[in-house]
Structure formats: structure tokens, C-alpha cells
Image (spheres, rainbow, N blue to C red):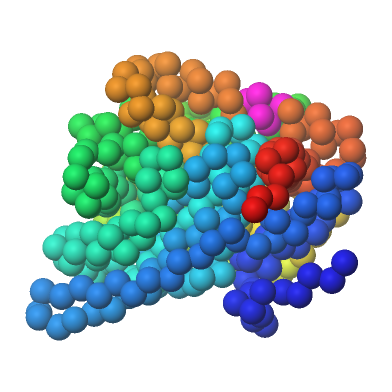
Amino acid sequence: MNHPIASYLQTDNLGAWGTYLEQVDRVTPYLGPLSRWVETLKRPKRILIVDVPIELDDGTIAHYEGYRVHHNLSRGPGKGGIRYHPNVTLSEVMALSAWMSIKTAVVNVPFGGAKGGIRVDPKPLSVGELERMTRRFTSEINMMIGPQKDIPAPDVNTNEQIMAWMMDTYSVNQGHTSTGVVTGKPIALGGSLGRRDATGRGVFVVAKEAYADMGCDVTQAKVAIQGLGNVGGEAARLFAKSGAKVVAIQDHSGTLYNPNGFNVPDLLRHVSIAHEIKGFDGESIPAESFWSTPCDILIPAALESQITKVNAQLIQAKLIVEGANGPTTPEADDILKERGIAVVPDVIANAGGVTVSYFEWVQDFSSFFWTEEEINRRLDKIMIDAFRGIDSIAKMHHVSLRTATFIVGCERILKAREMRGLYP
Ligand code: GLU
């Protein structure tokens, strides 16, 4: 069967979207009769590109490019974050939306996959400019979102305040308060306890489980973390709390090494004030040396395509747990497999965030809020059960954890797709 590629996908450099397509191709032979539907996964359901004009504080008018992509809605409403970053592109948002479809299916929460973003460096914007941009963007994507349609959440450079503005803008446009339209909101506006830390917590829980499966004890581990934001920061805190040593850290401002382990609470205090690791105590090393640092567990928790065919050769860790979305290229994946380094893929490792987003959405609908203990208990169980299921499939088929995870995710999506059938 010949499926001509859609015109907007015809680009030489597919980046993260290319990585995703390769991941789907690799899993297709394991999908049996469901592979008849696999093309569904290679095309987003719908894409909206919007112009976001705002008046800056100096009176000039700035225009930003915004996106919202619904990748797949077979299993439920769209779900996925909103990213503000100067390098956001349509193909990146497409990839991130597709990974959300797989992720929600892997942890079996009743959502499809979506993602949005604005191509902007939010750092120089004033609070007022950020609010105007967020509200205008929300109005522009109003037709795509809703508690039963598509539920945005925070991602890189977006936070609870931005979710509050999105919720308010949507609610004002609807004429009534609609808390369930976004997750990751402030607690006072229908947010959930535990949501902010959920992604980092999930990374730690899955890392501990995977490391134990290798016969090792996380409390004895040396850990290297790239990215000390919401995900990497909370993961670092939990590793250190367990007794593990965080020996190497990297962010946009530099790379630091401390073979005895950083004082993580001090480090997080520094990052919360400086918004970067620069200036914190530790030996400053070249960026490339981060990958070859002696460590047991490596946590990429920044952006896509960080582990490449070049640095995959240098990695010393026994286990990589992907806090970021799409941090490993397919070529790097092959090298890591050859070198016997286990990789817990993003679509399970960082699924803690969307899992507690699901809890938040449920709590908003029922207007009945759970305790943090209840949330963490349910989160840990979902993450551990999902990991164990995937691990046994990997062992059964003699495939990598990534392939096993994609088998589970793709099967769930395509079964739903098949049962619903084509209409009209
Ligand atoms: N942005 C997060 C992710 O990539 C969370 C998405 C959500 O909670 O909807 O998984």
C-alpha cells in the first residue's frame, strides 16, 4: 500500500518527529493484525497553527507563532502540555503530541495525545507580557480545547500561573468557571496535591524499580542528571533522600561534578533563586564530559535529542531513565543496546506527570479532592505496575524496554481505533 506523505511533513530534517516515526517503524512488526492501522499513528489527527499578537510594555506589537496538535483521540480527549521555548517548531510539537498518545496509553489513563507550544523565549518577557501572550494564545486555540476535548498542562517554561491564566481565559469565554480544562493548576483553583512533583517522583520510582530489577540498590547509586527543572530537580531530591549520590549535573549554564555527591537541598535552593546551576559549588567540567562521568544511573531531564550516536559511546551508566521527552535518538538507542545499557523510555519514565493530571481532572469533575498520600500511593502503584508489565513483555520478546513500551502503547491505541471503526 502506498501512503503518500502529507505535504507539511515533507522536510529534510524531521528532528524529534523523525525519531518518533522511526520508533513506530521499529515496533510495527510486533503489532500483528493491528499493524493494518499503524499509519494512524504516523499522522496527527489535526494541527492548528496560530498567530499570537501582543502589545509589549514599550508599545510595540510582537507576533509569536503558536501551535496545538491533536495527535490521536481514539482513547479519550487530547492531553498534553504547552511549551514556551525559542526552538519550538511544528514538527517538535507533533512529536511531543505523539509521545503523549503513547504515554497515556502506556499508563492506561483515558486520554489521547496532544501538545502545544509557542515559539518564544519567555525569559525576557515581563509578567504582564507573559499573561497577555498566554491569554491570546488560549483564545486562539479555544476551538481545540475543553474538559471533554483536549486538556493542556505545563511543560518546559510553563507553570501553575500560566495554567491559571489559561483556565480563566477559557472560562470567561465560556461564561462559566471550567476548572477541568487544564491540569497543573494552582491548588486554590482546583489543582491537585502532588501534581507539581509527580513527574520527578515517577522518574525516581521507575528508576528504583528498574535498578532493583538489575540486582542493584538505588541507595548505593551514583546519579548524573541533565536538567534541574521541575522534573530533574524533584528526581534529584528523591535520589539524594534515598541515600543515592548525585555526582554530576548539567543545565544551559554549565556542567558541575562532585564525586562525593552534591548537597541536593542546597543545590535546589540555589536553582530556585538563580534559575541555573552556575555559581553552585562543584568542579566545573566541559559540557561533553558530562556524558562520560562515572555514574550508575543517568537521567536526561532537559530537551530532545541529547543522547546522540557520538555521546552514546561515552556513557558510563548502567541505566538511563528518560525524564525528558525524546532525549535519545534512534541511532544512539542502538549503540546503548549494543553496549548493554538499559534505557527506561520517556513514555513510561516521565508518565507520572500526566498520571496525576488525570487524577486532577477526575477530582475537578467530582469536586472531591484527595489527600497527597492517596495521590502518591495511586501514582506509585500505576508507575510500578506499568513498568513491571513492560519489563515482562521486554523479556518475553527479547526486545528493549522502549520497544516493549511502544508495543503496549500502540496496541492499546490501535485496538481502540479498530473497535471504533472508520466513520463517516
Ligand atoms: N508536559 C507533561 C508531559 O510531557 C505533562 C502533560 C500533562 O500532564 O498533560 O508528560
Q: Nearer the viewer, residue 121 or 263?
A: 121
Residue 195 is situated, as x and y percent measured from the top left of the image, at 38, 34
Magenta segment, prevailing SS (helix, strand or loop): helix
Residue 5 is situated, as x and y percent measured from the top left of the image, at 72, 74
Answer left or right for 320 relative to 104: right
**Is residue 214 covered in magenta?**
no
In the depicted structure, whether residue 374 falls above or below residue 189: above
- Visible residue check, residue 21: yes
| Residue most extreme to the front | 424
Q: Nearer the viewer, residue 191 or 250?
A: 191
Residue 205 is situated, as x and y percent measured from the top left of the image, at 56, 30
Answer left or right for 62 relative to 141: left
Instruction: Name which residue lies at 19% across and 81% down.
Output: 61
Answer left or right for 254 relative to 8: left
Instruction: Name which residue lies at 68% across and 41% down.
Output: 420
Instruction: Name which residue lies at 87% across and 67% down.
Output: 1
Instruction: Name which residue lies at 19% across and 64% down.
Output: 132
Residue 124 is situated, as x and y percent measured from the top left of the image, at 23, 70
Q: Nearer the viewer, residue 13 or 101?
A: 101
Q: Quadrant of residue 58?
A: bottom left
In the depicted structure, whether residue 281 falls above or below residue 87: above
- Visible residue check, residue 401: no
Q: How many marks?
A: 0
What range is drawn magenta here? 384-388
Q: Quadrant of residue 315?
A: bottom right
Q: Nearer the viewer, residue 42 or 306?
A: 42
